[in-house]
Image (tube, helix red, strand yellow):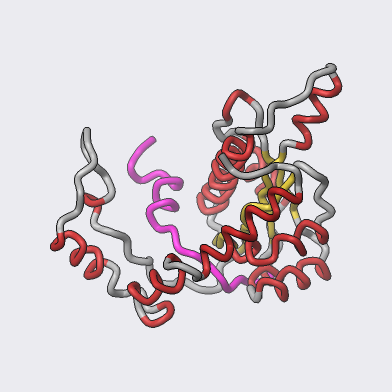
């Protein structure tokens, strides 16, 4: 693959798109995206994931309203990536076997994320904009009911795909030397931590990067709340605790 390939250009220019033009995606492009998603690596060849492609406009609007994410309704396509051990259970039962469920949550989540990332990368390489939707995790119980998900299937992330109607600035990232370690993990020094804040200074969500970290990752805040909902949804769907 050459440095000027469409895939590398698309990945290097990734940005979250939340405004879309009202243009459908041709069936051939959809088929390509879905085929690439299925080529993702998978543990034990299990392919412990499923996608729900939401095409019903009323259902899209319900999901958009529940999550307060208008782009779910406006994008040309919306997919929900799910952990899926239900199909595995059916396959094994068909041959008289029962699955061991204690570790399957981890493998299913990994499979689903890799497949979804492949789908997103294919969409961007074809010139479409994408936006992952983690806000589904705030309303997992409702999503399970709306999508009629059986036991053994649990939503993970959504993905909007469509022709972009905006070109936002690239979001900043941490200094590479603090992300890519060689041979052993290097503990960041105080000046390294300051470099992190300096590198991320362009983030204005919630007032700034420090404020965003506070709102998402400290005790009792957004991601801790989502984690509790996630564990409850897994138990509801018969997947138990992630381990």
Q: Tell me residue 236's x, y (percent).
A: 75, 51
Q: Is residue 98 above or below residue 114?
A: above
Q: Residue furthest bottom?
A: 207
Is 169 contained in the magenta span? no
Is 16 contained in the magenta span? yes
Q: Where the C terminus falls, by quadrant?
A: top right
Does the magenta stretch mainly form a helix, a strand or a loop? loop
Badge count: 0
Q: Which residue is depicted at the point 79% across and 19% down?
A: 97
Closer to the camera in the image, 182 or 231: 231
Residue stretch rendered in magenta on the structure: 1-22
User: Which image quadrant is residue 153 in?
Assistant: top right
Q: Is residue 151 left or right of residue 187?
A: right
Closer to the camera in the image, 234 or 60: 234
In the rendered image, is residue 228 in sight?
Answer: yes
Q: Is residue 14 above or below residue 17?
A: above
Q: Tell me residue 89's x, y (percent).
A: 78, 30
Q: Tell me residue 109's x, y (percent).
A: 59, 42
């Amino acid at each position: 693959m050459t440095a000027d390939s469409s895939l590398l250009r698309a990945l290097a220019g990734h940005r979250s798109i939340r405004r879309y033009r009202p243009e459908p995606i041709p069936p051939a492009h959809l088929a390509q995206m879905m085929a690439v998603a299925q080529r993702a690596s998978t543990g034990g060849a299990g392919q412990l994931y499923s996608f729900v492609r939401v095409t019903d406009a009323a259902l899209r609007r319900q999901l958009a309203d529940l999550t307060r994410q208008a782009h779910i309704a406006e994008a040309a396509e919306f997919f929900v990536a799910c952990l899926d051990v239900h199909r595995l259970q059916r396959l094994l039962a068909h041959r008289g076997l029962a699955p061991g469920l204690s570790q399957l949550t981890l493998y299913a989540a990994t499979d689903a994320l890799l497949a979804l990332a492949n789908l997103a990368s294919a969409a961007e390489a074809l010139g479409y904009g994408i936006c992952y939707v983690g806000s589904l995790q705030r309303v997992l119980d409702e999503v399970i009911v709306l999508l009629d998900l059986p036991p053994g299937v649990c939503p993970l992330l959504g993905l909007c795909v469509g022709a972009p109607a905006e070109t936002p600035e690239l979001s900043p990232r941490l200094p590479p030397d603090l992300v890519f370690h060689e041979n052993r993990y290097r503990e960041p020094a105080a000046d390294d931590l300051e470099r992190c804040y300096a590198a991320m200074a362009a983030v204005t969500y919630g007032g700034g990067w420090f404020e965003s970290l506070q709102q998402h990752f400290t005790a009792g805040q957004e991601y801790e709340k989502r984690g509790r909902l996630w564990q409850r949804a897994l138990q509801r769907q018969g997947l138990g605790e992630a381990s």
